[in-house]
Amino acid sequence: MEPSRHIEAYLNAQSVPFRLMPHAPTRTLIEAAQAAKVDYRRMVRAVMLEDAQGMVMAVLPASHMLDFTNLCQQLGRALQPVSQERLAGTFPDCEPGSIPPLAQPYGLTAIIDGQVAVMPQVCFEPGSHDALMVLSGADFMRLHGQSRQLQFSRPAANLAGRDEYEFVSAEASPTIKGLHPENLQQRIRDLTSLPPLPDSTRQLLLLRNNPRATIAELSAIVATDPMLAAQVIRYARSAYYGYRGRVESLQDAITQVLGFDLVLHIALGLSASRALRMPADGPLGMRSFWRHSVYTAGLAQALNTLLPPATRGKPGLVYLSGLLHDIGFAALAHLFQAEFYLLNKAVATNPRVPVTLIEKRVLGVEHTQIGNWLMQGWEMPAEVVTTVLEHHNEYYSGPHAAYANLVLLAEHLLKGRQPSDAAGNEAPPVILTALGLDAARVAEVTRKVLEESRPGLDEMAGIMAA
């Protein structure tokens, strides 16, 4: 991609000399520096923030972390990270995630960190992920002659020993002052009671353990909860299942579309999730949470059909495992609102950093551990308990590994197409080997699910988030 036309025209108009260094497409600034063979300490980046007063661009060295609290205090503003949708409208000639650290061509206000002022040369992405633009430090600062200069960054500490990720601190809200995330594990251990399960969930769990359970008994339990019954019927009517007949009742949903096993496990996921409250917005908010969960469940269920019959998981349980694999986020939102607020902001500010690394940095505990504790306490099926704990562990090979591996694979395949907390966007070879799957067949099933089933999956995600 060519550099931003705004940037190139602006530099030419200002008679500022610059040099372009093309390189192979990269994902992070440190990868770009390596590809272009430049010193990472010369790289600068922009972080976009906003409040009621408007949008502001914070410019700092790429090797430094933005001190969010300090910046907000100095400005006397309650800034928040700008959403990806807003960024796309603000930088229409730039690739997603590549924001040139020059504000004036876009009619924006900039604040520049004092560390940038002493850099003899600066390098930055000019709106694309396949080139770097190089300016002298003096020229770069001249372009920022009207920008306010403050000290609001510090050298970035490594995240879990990995220094290829740039991390922006999101500790900005007065509601989280005095919060000590490192004590979260002890606070979890100190909890004396779990969020209460809805009565329908308890009855469904009992029914699941009854080998003689009937469709009539399942219908009777679901029918005691009108909202749950309506959601199950809407599920059966969704475009994802492609049923052309009329679905007027629970009986129709079970016998004509979904089947006993799938209705039982869908109802379990729907009813259990209603015991937890979480905010609607943000990358970990309810809307994103259920969209990701439904897509993961749908893709895991489709991939399960590729497994040999002897190792194939039960379809309903595979679906439920995908639906609840990230339930730890919902438990965190319900039980520890301040910590969840902090984590949600940190993830929004650092879209390229794996969520698991951010959790370790911000909370000292992962959602897999919180979710596992909750699922065990609720006596959920062992397959679900295992999946919740192990769905980020490529090397897990214990009981019910197929369920955890299918969900892990689905998460990786979804990465890049929608928000996902997977570490990468390619099928891990060790998982393909463990499941005995062919990469080409996996790619074809993934394409079919994402292209042909998207309207139905979106509809089902809306049902979950309702």
Image (cartoon, rainbow, N blue to C red):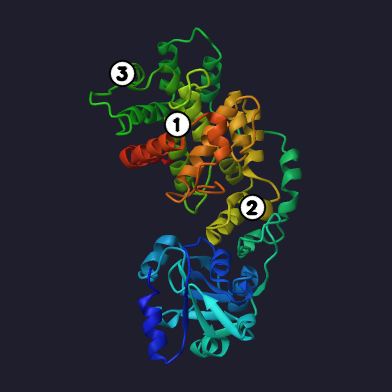
Residue 197 appears anywhere in the view: no
**Image-based side of 269 in relation to 400, left or right:** left
Mark 2–mark 1 distance (CA, rounded to whole Å): 27 Å
In the displayed image of the protein, which residue is found farthest to the left? 245
- Residue 338 at what x, y percent from top left? 63, 53
Q: Amino acid at mark 2?
A: Leu
Closest to the observer, 54 or 296:
296
Q: Is residue 131 above or below residue 249?
A: below
Instruction: Name the N-terminal-most of marks 2 and 1.
Output: 1
Of the two numbered discs 3 and 1 in the rendering, the one whose residue sits closer to the viewer: 1
Of residue 382 and residue 281, the one placed in the foreground of this image is 382
153 vs 427, left or right, is right
Q: Which residue position holds label 3?
A: 256
The quadrant in which residue 400 appears is top right
Residue 166 rendering spot, x and y as whole percentages: 60, 64
Indicate which label's residue lies in the foreground, 2 or 1: 1
Residue linked to disc 1? 303
Q: Quadrant of the N terminus?
A: bottom left
Residue 220 position within the rendered picture, expressed as x and y whole percent measured from the top left = 42, 16
The residue labelled by disc 2 is: 357
Report helix, strand or loop for mark 1.
helix
Identify the residue at horizontal 64%, vertical 81% (top origin).
Answer: 115
